[in-house]
Image (spheres, rainbow, N blue to C red):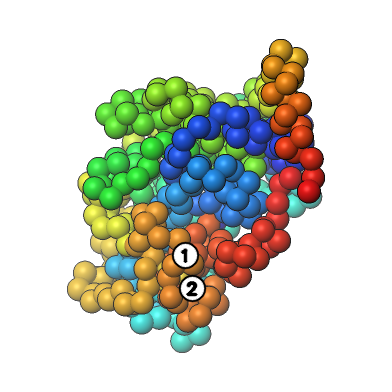
């Protein structure tokens, strides 16, 4: 129950004075209340918990995070001590 | 970008793991606060891929698990009343009270209904104006804003037959209590990302400073957990301690202002007792004076219940990270998710249930069972 999950906004409408959206969670579509993120737009992704959108997901920072992971270790591969790297590769040879 | 698969990429997980292995020179004990993170860690076997010197202690961040027995017994008493329709999230149904659970109340004729959202419970109240509809409001800072909004809506729409049984808890006072405990071994925290999506990060610098402990806001996918661990051990190895955000795609420093404003209006801070841990000052919310009419504890007399914890269950020690579920003699024997003795065996975010699902066989066979990320 405590797991909040990302979903994509498909449609937005006003109901009983409350802003509601249909949100797609990888094929399962649910009704979600947008009162806490009133400026969320169709096509955006949001963290949803028990039927409420709590925060939008920011594509730029998601990309930056993934980019950072991609670069991990690269600097060392380029500038590290080649003897130390060769020794490590030896150790990593499958037994 | 779909924000899930990208953060499960095995090649990037391998890079992060290598970086962690390179960084660590000494033993460190970190606590992941949130049960959702515990679930990811055990499911993907992340703890087994980390260097042996990095220990992950599972924190008390599963709301189902920490809801005190007294509150479960109150829920059972209210749900048994003939005029009541009792609505709850599904994973509360099997949480054992002193002598039964909500399932049994239902089989004995109680009107117990499972809802996905508190707004669904409000809907039930509108459809059944001659019944009393009670929603079991448990959870952390992520569930509290939806419940606050629901009470606010009930008030706005004049729905008088709705009330909330409130057992909300807050994360920062729990971190404070853990750090103050004399048995505490935790040297760094992976803070619960979604709690911070709502509350922001402003409560944490004080904690980090006071206890000289790194606090890294962490997400829920395997790469998020690994990045949280990497940043925490990096601080520890450097002898630093500060608040760091490893989950910026969902967490802004200020959190969600509208949700925080609603919380401040509908709730007020109160002491709460945590199952297996005891009372932690200022660690929860109750309805504020303005909304007291919507408090189920005021509407129904439930004060003089007698509660007893099962003697065999060691969930209190599990919740404080003092033992792992395997060290409990009842684990997998008299205690299983179908017949849980303690709340940590009920929800898949509870440490006992996560171990039962992915690591029932004990140490030797564990690695094959875990759904490894690399
Ligand atoms: S395995 Fe069952 S009895 Fe043992 S601590 Fe966990 S919930 Fe309690």
Q: From what the image shows, is residue B95 above or below residue B120?
A: below
How far apart marks 1 and 2 lie (CA) works out to 7 Å
Q: Earlier in the sequence, mark 1 or mark 2?
A: 1
Nearer to us in this view, B13 or B362: B362
Horizontal side of B292 relative to B107 (left or right) equals left
Does dot 1 land on a helix, a strand or a loop? helix
Residue B178 locus on image (x, y percent): 31, 46
Nearer to us in this view, B42 or A56: B42
The subunit carrying tag 2 is: B
Residue B81 visible from this viewpoint: no
Which disc is residue B331 wearing? 2
Tag 1 and tag 2, C-beta contact below 8 Å = yes
Nearer to us in this view, B316 or A9: B316
| Number of numbered discs | 2
Q: From what the image shows, is residue A73 above or below residue B303?
A: above
Q: Is mark 2 within 8 Å of ligand 1?
A: yes
Residue B106 locus on image (x, y percent): 49, 80
Q: Is mark 1 within 8 Å of ligand 1?
A: yes
Determine which quarter of the picture holds residue B250: top right
Residue B102 locus on image (x, y percent): 45, 75
Which residue, given by chain and number where applicable, does mark 1 sit on? B325
Residue B70 locus on image (x, y percent): 29, 68
Do the residues at pointers 1 and 2 share their chain? yes
Q: Quadrant of the C terminus of chain B?
A: top right
Does dot 2 land on a helix, a strand or a loop? loop
Q: From what the image shows, is residue B98 above or below residue B150?
A: below
Horizontal side of B331 relative to B9 (left or right) equals left
Residue B225 visible from this viewpoint: yes
């Amino acid at each position: 129950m405590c797991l909040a999950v990302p979903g994509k906004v498909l449609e937005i409408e006003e109901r009983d004075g409350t802003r509601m959206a249909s949100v797609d969670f990888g094929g399962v579509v649910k009704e979600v209340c947008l009162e806490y993120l009133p400026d969320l737009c169709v096509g955006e992704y949001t963290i949803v918990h028990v039927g409420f959108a709590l925060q939008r997901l920011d594509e730029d920072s998601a990309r930056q995070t993934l980019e950072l992971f991609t670069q991990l270790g690269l600097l060392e591969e380029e500038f590290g001590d080649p003897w130390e790297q060769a020794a490590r590769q030896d150790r990593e040879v499958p037994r | 970008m779909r924000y899930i698969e990208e953060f499960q990429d095995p090649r990037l997980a391998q890079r992060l793991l290598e970086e962690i292995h390179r960084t660590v020179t000494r033993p460190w004990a970190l606590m992941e606060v949130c049960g959702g993170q515990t679930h990811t860690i055990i499911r993907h076997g992340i703890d087994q891929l980390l260097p042996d010197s990095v220990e992950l202690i599972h924190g008390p961040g599963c709301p189902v698990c920490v809801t005190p027995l007294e509150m479960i017994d109150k829920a059972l008493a209210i749900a048994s009343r003939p005029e009541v329709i009792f609505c709850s999230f599904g994973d509360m149904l099997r949480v054992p009270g002193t002598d039964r659970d909500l399932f049994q109340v239902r089989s004995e004729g109680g009107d117990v209904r499972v809802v996905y959202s508190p707004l669904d419970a409000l809907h039930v109240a509108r459809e059944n104006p001659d019944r009393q509809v009670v929603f079991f409001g448990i959870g952390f800072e992520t569930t509290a804003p939806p419940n606050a909004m629901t009470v606010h809506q009930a008030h706005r729409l004049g729905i008088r037959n709705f009330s909330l049984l409130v057992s909300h808890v807050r994360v920062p006072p729990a971190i404070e209590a853990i750090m103050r405990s004399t048995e505490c071994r935790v040297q760094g925290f992976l803070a619960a990302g979604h709690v911070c999506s709502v509350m922001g990060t402003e409560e944490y610098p004080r904690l980090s400073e006071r206890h000289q402990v790194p606090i890294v806001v962490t997400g829920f996918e395997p790469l998020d957990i690994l990045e949280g661990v990497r940043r925490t051990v990096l601080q520890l190895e450097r002898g630093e301690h500060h608040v760091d955000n490893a989950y910026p795609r969902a967490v802004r420093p200020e959190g969600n202002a509208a949700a925080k404003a609603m919380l401040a209006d509908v709730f007020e801070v109160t002491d709460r007792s945590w199952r297996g841990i005891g009372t932690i000052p200022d660690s929860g919310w109750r309805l504020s004076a303005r909304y007291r009419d919507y408090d189920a504890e005021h509407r129904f007399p439930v004060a003089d219940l007698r509660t007893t914890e099962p003697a065999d269950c060691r969930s209190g020690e599990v919740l404080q990270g003092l033992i792992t579920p395997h060290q409990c003699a009842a684990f997998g024997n008299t205690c299983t998710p179908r017949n849980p003795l303690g709340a940590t065996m009920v929800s898949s975010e509870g440490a006992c249930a996560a171990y039962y699902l992915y690591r029932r066989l004990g140490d030797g066979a564990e690695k094959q069972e875990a759904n490894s990320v690399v």
